[in-house]
Image: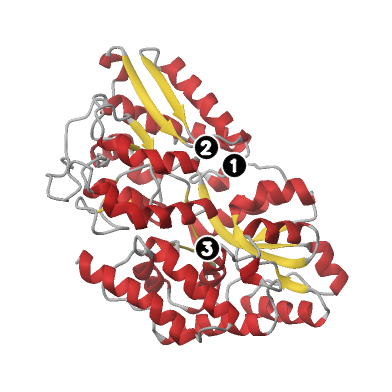
Amino acid sequence: MTSRRVAVAALLGALGLLAAGCTPGSDNTAAPPPTDRAVQTDIAALGPVTLTVWDQEVRGGQNEQMERLNAAFQQQYPNITIKRDSRSFDDLATTLRLALSGNDAPDVVQANNGRADMGAFVAAGELLPLGPWARAYGWDQRYPDSVSQYVSYSPDGKVFGEGEMYGLPQVGEVVGIYYNPAELQRLGVAVPTTWEQFEAALAAVKAAGTTPIALGNVEGWPALHVFGTVQDQLVPADQITDLAFGRKGASWTTPENTQAAQRVAEWARAGYFTEGVNGIDDNQAWQAFARGEAAFLIGGSWYAADLEAAMGQNVRFMPPPPPAGLPVSATGGTGLPFAITSASDAPDAAAAYLDFITSSDAMQVLTETGNLPVVDTAAQTPPAGLSRDVFAAFAAVADGGRLLPYLDYATPTMGDTMGAALQDLLSGAQPPEAALSKVEADYAAFVEKNG
């Protein structure tokens, strides 16, 4: 989940119940849409259709890929007209909820994966389960389980990570480690290939008088990615998955999670993070890294374009190096998936559109426009350097490693709760056990209510 997604998800989580109260079906008592239906894949036979599509692909390469794919789709299916409404991520997040409950809902929308958005829409019966089209088009084979879990819910929206697919993503995201090779060479520190070497590199960089990790955490969410990266190396993957999907039976206060929190606290006490970490923001942190003021930056693939523009060839990216003998593990997921609304009167045309913009040919277009395809990643040939590093990292984690969910997925309010707990942990205001107790309380209350 990108920076903006965490922040907006937290806001929507806080407002979710209020907004849902105005939404037909939002009391979760409405019958969910059927999970089986006859589908039509002969799109020419549908006659003239206008598809209204809401997306948030507004940035350079994002918009370019949508323009190219929409033009190609309409050329292949001249009876279909795309009426595109492209909004910023923040604008989409704040308008989609009301749009889905209105009388003129779009046919296709991009909906954030988490419980505050897609989960609430599924619970309200506002999105169609994609099973019938998944079987017709082979989407269940297109996406590995490590990716499809991010768009899967039970029909009542209570279970996240299992059940029916409710959206198809185009792009992938992975949290890893950016490093400055020139700075490491100057300090005489080798690029680490194991977690143990990475921690030794942090100590060596600090001993040499340089900040090891650039981190600005005034927003609260950046530290989630640091904690998640540490947690991914110390806590069994199934425990992290259960916690992040808000499932019963897990706990934040296990010895393994406590060890992860202790490690982050140790790094803070050792001065491994930017001084005044809770008083500077994320933009200041990555820009400081770009200026060579730190050796490493832990963060997602969404920084790549800005860092490459600022640093050229002097920035590289790798997935978190795993502890010796263990597979590579990283937090990550997908860009906002495209979903079909229950209000659509042309769901078969909408499904054909989803199939087209997530096909192998579409993945090539994504690569050509500077985006990270969520499938067929290893088959692409990105430019050498940082882009190729990011592609390789995602492929390694998604296909052969463990792609673990964003931690704020756990509950509608987890982004705020965990952000505050980690600020206290970094400042030393709370010991690891107390910080995790706050997170556990949020998780336990949600699990109890969700059933």
Q: Is residue 166 visible?
A: yes
Disc number at residue 221?
A: 3
Q: Which residue is pictured at 57% across the width and 84% down the height?
A: 428
Q: Nearer the viewer, residue 30 or 247?
A: 30
Q: Label 3, secondary structure: give it.
A: loop
Q: Quadrant of residue 238?
A: bottom left
The amino acid pointed to by label 1 is: Gln
Q: 95 above or below 283?
A: above
Q: Are marks 3 and 1 in contact (CB under 8 Å)?
A: no
Q: In the image as oriented, which residue stretches furthest toward the right?
A: 186
Please rate how many residues cluster around mark 3, counting C-alpha atoms within 10 Å: few if below 14, some from 14 to 19, many from 20. many
Q: Which residue is pictured at 48% across the width and 55% down the height?
A: 7
Residue 442 in percent (x, y) is at 34, 72
Q: Label 1, secondary structure: give it.
A: loop
Q: Which residue is pictured at 54% across the width and 55% down the height?
A: 3
Q: Nearer the viewer, mark 3 or mark 1?
A: 3
Q: CA distance from mark 1 to mark 2?
A: 8 Å
Q: Nearer the viewer, mark 1 or mark 2?
A: 2
Q: Which residue is pictured at 59% across the width and 50% down the height?
A: 302
Residue behind mark 2: 363
The amino acid pointed to by label 3 is: Trp
Disc number at residue 380?
A: 1
For this view, does 29 lie left or right of residue 398? left
Q: Nearer the viewer, residue 45 or 413?
A: 413
Q: Are marks 1 and 2 in contact (CB under 8 Å)?
A: yes
